[in-house]
Image: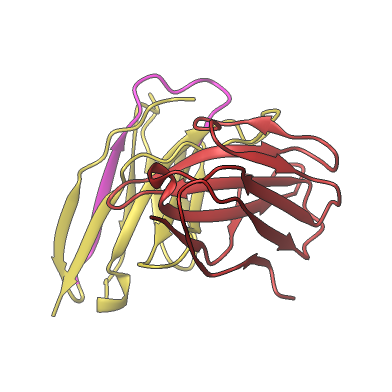
Chain colours: A yellow, B red
Amino acid sequence: LAKTTQPISMDSYEGQEVNITCSHNNIATNDYITWYQQFPSQGPRFIIQGYKTKVTNEVASLFIPADRKSSTLSLPRVSLSDTAVYYCLVGDPLGSARQLTFGSGTQLTVLP
Amino acid sequence: NAGVTQTPKFRVLKTGQSMTLLCAQDMNHEYMYWYRQDPGMGLRLIHYSVGEGTTAKGEVPDGYNVSRLKKQNFLLGLESAAPSQTSVYFCASSGGPDSYEQYFGPGTRLTVT
């Protein structure tokens, strides 16, 4: 399972766009990039997943360059309720165990 | 549709005591997982199951046992609790043939004194 590196913490203000970058230099051909969000005292929640280029859903966008050695989670116009820990994970969704490896994540704090 | 539920929500054990944590899912998922999360850290995989009757070790399996006798349930056992097992335990499940998304339960906060 590929190791990921992401900033420990980030601060932002309400209404701003937030970009969290994750480095995964040893990503394998079959690996996808997935982001989870975790609020205090809750289990993580799936945000978005992608393989290459750009993926967008109703809450976030995921940008993946051609070499796939990094990815950027983009949260548009954040609010106070987006304060949470964000985890970047890399792995093969069709692997035999579909294991996830969580790093320490990025603590995003949204300020008023 | 309750998703993933965990029992109990909180528990305090004395060193050496045993207990079982129950995880139940109603999404007919094949895959189930047990994680632990220590303060300020990410989740670490303890054990997992790829189907009824199967279990496998994760990253930190020592001191824990699991069973998956029914597809919807995944039990985590501590035979002789130690203070180092004080943690928050999360269960998760996933199921689709091309789905990487795991659905997590609300967690069990365990304190071993």
- Quarter in which the N terminus of chain B is drawn: bottom right
Q: Residue B87 in the image: x percent, y percent?
A: 41, 52
Q: Residue A92 in the image: x percent, y percent?
A: 59, 31
Q: Residue B86 in the image: x percent, y percent?
A: 40, 51
Question: Which residues fall within the magenta stretch?
Answer: A16-32
Count of all numbered marks drawn on residues in the image: 0
Q: Residue B91 in the image: x percent, y percent?
A: 60, 54
- Quarter in which the C terminus of chain B is drawn: bottom left
Q: Nearer the viewer, residue A16 or B106?
A: B106
Q: Residue at x 50, y 20 (%)?
A: A28
Q: Residue at x 24, y 56 (%)?
A: A107
Q: Nearer the viewer, residue A23 or A17?
A: A23
Name above or below for residue A37 compared with residue B1.
above
Name above or below for residue B11 compared with residue A53.
below
On the picture, is B10 further left or further right than A37? right
Q: Is residue B6 part of the magenta span, yes or no?
A: no
Q: Is residue A21 part of the magenta span, yes or no?
A: yes
On the picture, is B89 further left or further right than A68? right
Q: Nearer the viewer, residue B95 or B84?
A: B84
